[in-house]
Amino acid sequence: MADDLLSAADPNADSYSAASIEVLEGLEPVRKRPGMYIGGTDERALHHLVAEILDNSMDEAVAGHASRIEVELLADFSVVIRDNGRGIPIDPHPKFPGKSALEVILCTLHAGGKFSGDAYQTSGGLHGVGASVVNALSDSMVVQVARNKELFQQSFSRGIPLGPVERIGAAPNRRGTTVTFHADEEIFGHHRFKPARLLKMVKSKAYLFSGVEIRWKSEIDDGETPREATFHFPGGLADYLAETLSGTTTYADRPFAGSVDFRRFNAPGKVDWAINWTPSRDGFIQSYCNTVPTPEGGTHEAGFWSAILKGIRAYGERVSNKKAAQITREDLLTGGCALVSCFIREPEFVGQTKDRLATTEAARLVEGAVRDHFDNWLASDTKSAGAILDFLVLRAEERLRRRQEKETARKTATKKLRLPGKLVDCSATNRDGTELFIVEGDSAGGSAKMARDRTNQALLPLRGKILNVLGAASSKMGANQEINDLCQALGVGMGSRFNVDDLRYDKVIIMTDADVDGAHIASLLMTFFFTQMRPLIDKGHLYLACPPLYRLTQGAHRIYVADDAEKERMLAKGLGGKGKIDVQRFKGLGEMDAKDLKDTTMNPKTRKLIRVSIDDEDGGETGDLVERLMGKKPELRFEYIQENARFVEELDV
Ligand SMILES: Nc1ncnc2c1ncn2[C@@H]1O[C@H](COP(=O)(O)OP(=O)(O)OP(=O)(O)O)[C@@H](O)[C@H]1O
Ligand SMILES: [Mg+2]
Ligand SMILES: [Mg+2]
């Protein structure tokens, strides 16, 4: 039996012995598995190198030892980070004879001064890994330390010292640490530091700790990022939020913002926060712990939302708004824009890139600190409080209604959706190849109904009433019949509840008259889709139909033209027939007979369609764009859309 087992075993088993078990020494593991330490080798990971070194300087500043940090991007993509803190210790390390503390810190994993909380109270650093990891992944790293009026330096390559730490001169007026490193291309390949991304990081650090001034310099010019800037924000997170939301309508004039020391809970640290609500975009929360961004949230976020939720419900009760009890955390996030930054002792993060805070204590501390202040704020600014409460109640009702609709839909045995009465649906059961034409007015719907291909083309006539609504806040939209019809016909929800997979049609085609009013309605609809159903545009489902403005007839010859210029050209050139050219201007789609409409605008073989797309080069700027599109003057909107040829891309389909 045992023999069988042995003979069945892999003949190569012998070579898998103790000799195959490697122990990676020093910083080798970092170079072998960078992902474990910095989350990968892509652009994000590359930029994380700067975060590690900058965090060390920030820790020094938050501990009260440094007031200024300089970050410089050099022409060869080296990064220099300098602070005026205490300077990394350079004296011989008691446990490693012959090595300075500096060398131990930079060449050993888990060497650091932040384990005990003696040298730092609330630091972002805690693993003793950051600086050594950056060193391991840099083909060149030079660290200068100014301490006791002397300047010291040590150089490294790929984590290996090129010599001992040396005194290189006097530094009578200086103190602090300067780290210059160049990321190793063997690890990061073609990825390069992006000035804009670094600037954003640097700036957010200055907002997070108002006790520091950060100077930025870049020898790389990307055409948009300033080459030099100095950041110091005494207003902290309130200013940060105001900048993020600049130009956006908000429910409170001043955000609910504050800063509370945890001393009153007998704990070290504090929390800073700022929050406001807006009808014009989806909400977000950016959280930080000890100035380290925590994009996946964690206990501090949970504590924060808990305080806000309990506060708003209690306020609702006080003003006898019974519906306030229905508000949930999910509702808070719709339109709620929040920044939360806590400083705590010995934080526990998930992973070395510290994406999520796990310290249980943080939830209790943050909730306790924010709650009282929120109650006071709501009581003192009743105008903002009322507006926010009304908004949140609407969101809660909307959510409940949707859930109920889903449940009733599930209950009906025939899985048929509730569709608006005026929808002229197509017969195809599969979404592929189907089209929904949104047409202006009922009369246009008449010819379109005859012109369509009933197997795959559906129609939804919308009345002019929609105009008034599209300028309104999204909370009002939910209550509007036309918008509800549109959502039901498409089979989707608005805003954060939009799911592109639910879409009932492949193409959504806006078909309005070829005049100014038509263009106006089209631009309003585009704005609506942009703000409420953005993925519908991103995934290429939204189109504009291009109905003609004129029909020219000369005997048996007949053509359609889109605009005046083309009409003049054709009149001069002639149609090839005899006699007078008859010109008919279509005042509206409703005037076209079904055949004309079919040939020019609806038949996939002969029509022209424009696909609506958004040029998202400037990612973060979309907020501005929404404001511009949502602004009060419709002419501006249409001009904007027309001028930005990039916004609509022509396509014959
Ligand atoms: N700019 C600096 N000024 C003073 N001391 C520093 C500076 N940078 C690093 N140090 C010292 O070096 C130690 C190691 O830094 P390193 O970034 O490797 O780990 P850490 O910050 O302790 O933890 P983490 O791995 O979470 O970043 C720090 O704990 C600190 O004592
Ligand atoms: Mg660190
Ligand atoms: Mg280290």
Image (cartoon, rainbow, N blue to C red):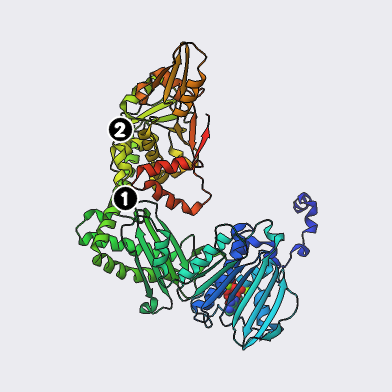
Q: Which amino acid, by three-letter code, is at mark 2?
A: Arg
- Gap in Å between the C-alphas at discs 1 and 2? 26 Å
State left or right for residue 26 relative to residue 482: right
Front one among 192 and 453: 192
Q: Position of residue 275 (x, y in %)?
A: 36, 62
Q: Position of residue 95 (x, y in %)?
A: 67, 84
SS for dot 1: helix
* Res 123 visible: yes
Answer with the quarter of the image where residue 435 lies: top left
**In this rendering, the label closer to the viewer, 1 or 2:** 2
Reply above or below: 167 against 353: below
Answer with the quarter of the image where residue 636 lies: top left
Front one among 451 and 595: 595
Answer with the quarter of the image where residue 339 lies: bottom left
Name the quadrant where ligand 3 sits.
Answer: bottom right
Tag 1 residue: 395
Which mark is on residue 193? Answer: none
* Residue at the left extreme of this rendering: 320
Name the N-terminal-most of marks 1 and 2.
1
Q: Which amino acid, by three-letter code, is at mark 1?
A: Arg
Q: Residues within 10 Å of mark 1 (few under 14, many from 20)?
A: many
Q: Position of residue 67 (x, y in %)?
A: 51, 79
The residue carrying mark 2 has its beta carbon less than 8 Å from ligand 1:
no
Tag 2 residue: 463
Q: Position of residue 426 (x, y in %)?
A: 41, 25
